[in-house]
Image (cartoon, rainbow, N blue to C red):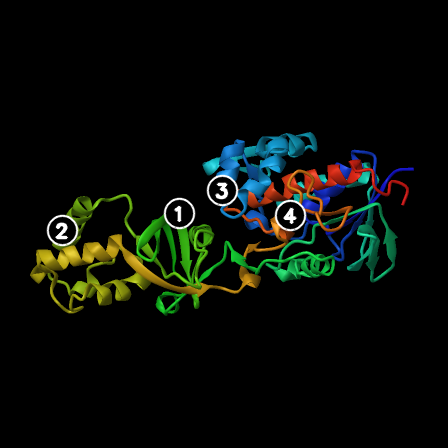
Amino acid sequence: MSKKIVIVGGGAAGMMAAISAAEKSAAVTLLEPNERLGKKLNITGKGRCNVTNNADLQTLLANVPKNGKFLYSAFSRFDGRDAMAFFERLGVPLKTERGNRVFPVSDRSFDVSAALERRLKTLKVRLLRDRALSLDIADGMVTGVRGEQGSYPAGAVVLATGGVSYPATGSTGEGHRLAREAGHTVTPLQGSLVPLRDFGVGRDLQGLSLRNVALTVFENDKKIYMDFGELLFTHFGVSGPLVLSASAHMRHFDKKAYRLEIDLKPALDEGQLDKRLLSDFAKYANHDFANALNDLLPQKLIPTVVAWSEIPPHQKVHDLTREQRQGLIRILKHFPVVIAGPCPVTDAIVTSGGVKVSEINPTTMESKIVKGLYFAGELIDVDAYTGGFNLQIAWATGHAAGQAAAECNQGDEN
């Protein structure tokens, strides 16, 4: 008889675990309460799905700021290039973009989830629309899963229910509850890749999107991160790709202060920017200062920049001093946003925190507390920066858990 394995959760990690176990000839049941598999997967990368990162092992590990060493074995056996080969075999042509980010050529995340679903069907994985309520555990071994619709005996169970970010996709923290009930420790859950709250600048500039700006993050006045791209001011603070990436580096809000500095003109050094200002000011020599920045800045940003420059808005441009100009340049190159804290974890792309890694075998993803119980994906206390690294964690841990669950000898005839 084939070994019976139950996978709880039909997201990226769960589907990969199911496929990996079924490819080892296990009889796999996949429990997922959503009508569609991969609901969160389908909205990643703005619907394009940043599948993985075309990176070697050391680069992958360097992009996992928390518990990266735990993933050494999983990444060694299934890295970004293995993930690429896997999806190419499933008929999803891929392309590599800036930062080695990998996307489907079609730019459609549904092509990725559809390919996984086809593979599950080919391997005869049994898909059931059910929500897991509890684990059956006897003598320190898992023996099955109880759901709302029925009970599912199993020789091994893989929990891959995701974190608590984007709860509308089904990530409601149920897996953390099941893990705790099995005796596991769940570390505090918070958002990573999350919008940030400020002290009012965002509200003043709400709706303003800035492209091609440079962002620097300071932690207690120490520069910890810098990137280039796009951000958005919102009613609560700041968001957008640049901010989400930056937030993953801001991990100590309870004991450290954070601020952002935006370089509004990163293509120009201070000398070049001064020449640009002199050119603009010659054009608007007889205008009020507040009306002389239209060629330089978005309209919505001008009142804030004028206020922070401390130059009287009605001062004539031809009367501006060199010192006033230098003060304006400082604002344009170091536009400050003091951060109050992250938005709630429910607004985050990824959950930081989860099942404690010291309680999981890093090679097999098996629980060290309950035999036959495995973990995969965002449920585990690991998270990464943007760039396809979080999905790579899902693929690698799902692959490791599925294979190990199928191969372990315990309870083969359950």
* Whether label 2 touches label 4, CB < 8 Å: no
| Residue type at numbered disc 1 | Gly
| Residue type at numbered disc 4 | Gly
Mark toward the viewer: 4 or 1: 4
Q: Please state the horizontal and vertical placement of residue 385, each as a whole percent of the image.
A: 49, 46
Q: Earlier in the sequence, mark 2 or mark 3?
A: 3
Mark toward the viewer: 1 or 3: 3
Q: Residues within 10 Å of mark 1 (few under 14, many from 20)?
A: some
**Residue at 22%, 44% in the rendered image:** 269
Q: Which image quadrant is residue 393 in? A: top right
* Helix, strand or loop under label 2: helix
The quarter of the picture where the N terminus appears is top right
Mark toward the viewer: 2 or 3: 3
| Residue type at numbered disc 2 | Leu
Whole-angstrom CA distance, mark 2 to mark 4, is 55 Å
Mark toward the viewer: 2 or 4: 4
Q: Which image quadrant is residue 168 in? A: bottom right
Q: Earlier in the sequence, mark 3 or mark 4?
A: 3
Q: Earlier in the sequence, mark 1 or mark 2?
A: 1
The residue to which callout 2 is attached is 278
Above or below, 139 against 55 in this view is below
The residue to which callout 3 is attached is 63
Horizontal side, residue 246 vs residue 82: left or right: left
Whole-angstrom CA distance, mark 3 to mark 4, is 16 Å
Horizontal side, residue 406 vs residue 324: left or right: right
